[in-house]
Image (spheres, rainbow, N blue to C red):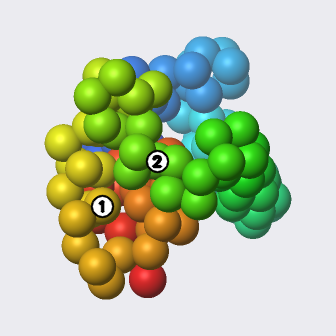
Amino acid sequence: MRYKDLEDAFSAARLNKYKNACGGNTNKALILYRHNVKLCQKFYGVLNIFEIILRNAINQHYTSYFNDADWIYHQLQNGGMLEHSPKHSAIASLTTSPSVSMQQVVRAWSMPRQTTPSS
């Protein structure tokens, strides 16, 4: 792929740091960008596992702290810790569905781009 094609697809702002790091050499910038993609791929699995472990640890902590397996539902109520959460309405609508597990609600609450639970 040509540098200009990648720049059109991703944006000059995204690629400028690679181009600047390579002294303006676009061929080297493409190589550096590809290396960065490969490096990110190596970390993705570890980050994914870490995110799941962290999310589950947070859920376990608040389940124990509130002594309530449905803590997220109850904390969405008036006066609860999550009453003013930016995702309040989206999460509140999930908690009323009998087919949605508490783990799915926690997942939806903790993932920034996800507004509905996945299986």
Q: Say what secondary structure mark 2 lies in.
A: helix
Name the residue located 68 percent from the left edge and 24 percent from the top edge: 22
Depth check, front residue: 103 or 108: 103
Q: Which residue is mark 2?
A: 72
**Are the residues flagged by discs 2 and 1 in contact, CB closer than 8 Å?**
yes
> Tag 1: residue type?
Thr
Identify the mark at residue 37; answer none if there is no mark.
Answer: none
Quarter of the image holding residue 84?
top left
Regarding residue 17, the answer to whether it shows in the image is: yes
The x and y percentages for residue 10 are 35, 42
Quarter of the image holding residue 33?
top right
On the rendered image, what quadrant is the N terminus found in?
A: bottom left
The answer to whether residue 85 is above or below residue 92 is: above
Q: Say what secondary structure mark 1 lies in.
A: helix
The answer to whether residue 86 is above or below residue 37 is: above
- Whichever of callouts 2 and 1 sits on the residue coming sooner in the sequence is 2
The x and y percentages for residue 16 are 49, 22
Badge 1: few (under 14), some or many (20 or more) residues near its Cα, within 10 Å?
some
The x and y percentages for residue 73 are 39, 50
Name the residue located 53 percent from the left edge and 67 percent from the top edge: 103
The x and y percentages for residue 96 are 23, 65
The answer to whether residue 78 is above or below residue 107 is: above
> Tag 2: residue type?
Ile
